[in-house]
Amino acid sequence: MLVNLNDVLKKAQKERYAVGLFNATDSDMLDALISAAEELRSPIIIGTAEVLLPYGELSLIAPGLVSAAKNASVPVVVHYDHGLTFSRCMEALKRGFSSVMFDGSAKNYDENIAETKEIVRIAHAMGASVEGEIGHVGDNVNDEGEVTDMYTKPGEAVEYLAATGVDALAVAIGTAHGAYKHKPKLDINRLKEIRAAVDVPLVLHGGSGLSDEDFRNCIEAGVSKVNIFTDLCLAGSAAMKSAAERGLDYLECRNEKVAAIKKEAEKKMRLFGCAGKA
């Protein structure tokens, strides 16, 4: 069934588990993710991000995502992640996405507030939820293994929520997008301070590549949503490579890719504690 973030994250926050956002750029990934969620009876958040549109344009991917969510036997949020432009966020909502993240974190504070507030006003009128970000989760590009982006400050998080009315808040505590070159240094104490200061579900971006212990610590400290994409791609790529080397044909390779992505998603669902929560 198609739901929004509030329908799955408030329960997760209360019961101290997390729900995964798994991006799907094509029907193969979508097949794997919905199958994993239904098999484990887990709520799931599926979607895409603005930076991924060259690999799966909204006009092509949105109908499949929304249809799969409506026909699923478990709660499914269809989420537009890291929307960088107002127009693309509006397009996602018009195409049936039940949730959007407007990422104004690279803008100055006042611009971020104003634009996020307007997105919230429109999305809420359409029955959709909104995730915002204060602080900035960047990319894994520093060869020294240091995350130099701005961390979330508890006081700013409180002000941001009061000013925008977002339903969930992405926080920067030392994670980064993409494959980690070095073990990330997570500021769990800062996460606990943010959790104590605000009352909305908290979101961890840059989840792929963290250790099981990292995930458990973050969820215990208050994270209710974890974003995963790179780990799915790595699992799918490895399966395709292995299948091709064994001389399997295209469709056989495809089936092994789907099975590998499904297995990785199921692993994360069990780890996050959302298996059996649908």
Image (tube, helix red, strand yellow):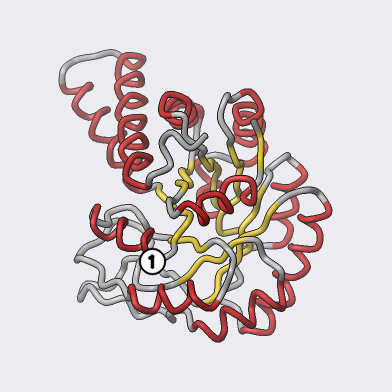
The image quadrant that residue 77 belongs to is top right
Q: Residue at x 35, y 80 (%)?
A: 148
Q: Image check: 165 left or right of 15?
A: right
In the rendered image, the residue lying farthest to the front is 15
At mark 1, the secondary structure is loop
Q: Residue at x 66, y 46 (%)?
A: 4
Q: Residue at x 58, y 36 (%)?
A: 76
Judge whether 73 appears above or below 169 on screen: above
Residue 130 screen position, x and y as percent? 66, 58
Residue 103 screen position, x and y as percent? 59, 66
Residue 135 screen position, x and y as percent? 50, 77
Q: Image check: 151 left or right of 93?
A: left
Mark 1 lies on residue: 221
Judge whether 73 appears above or below 15 on screen: above
**Nearer-the-camera pick, 247 or 142:** 142
Q: Image check: 261 left or right of 181?
A: right
Count of numbered labels shown in the rendering? 1
Judge whether 72 appears above or below 201 on screen: above
Residue 258 screen position, x and y as percent? 37, 25
Q: Image check: 151 left or right of 69?
A: left
The image quadrant that residue 35 belongs to is top left
Say what amino acid the circle numbered 1 marks. Answer: Ala
Crowding at mark 1 (Cα within 10 Å: few <14, some 14-19, many 20+):
many
**Nearer-the-camera pick, 37 or 227:** 37
Q: Quadrant of the N terminus?
A: top right
In the rendered image, the residue lying farthest to the right is 125
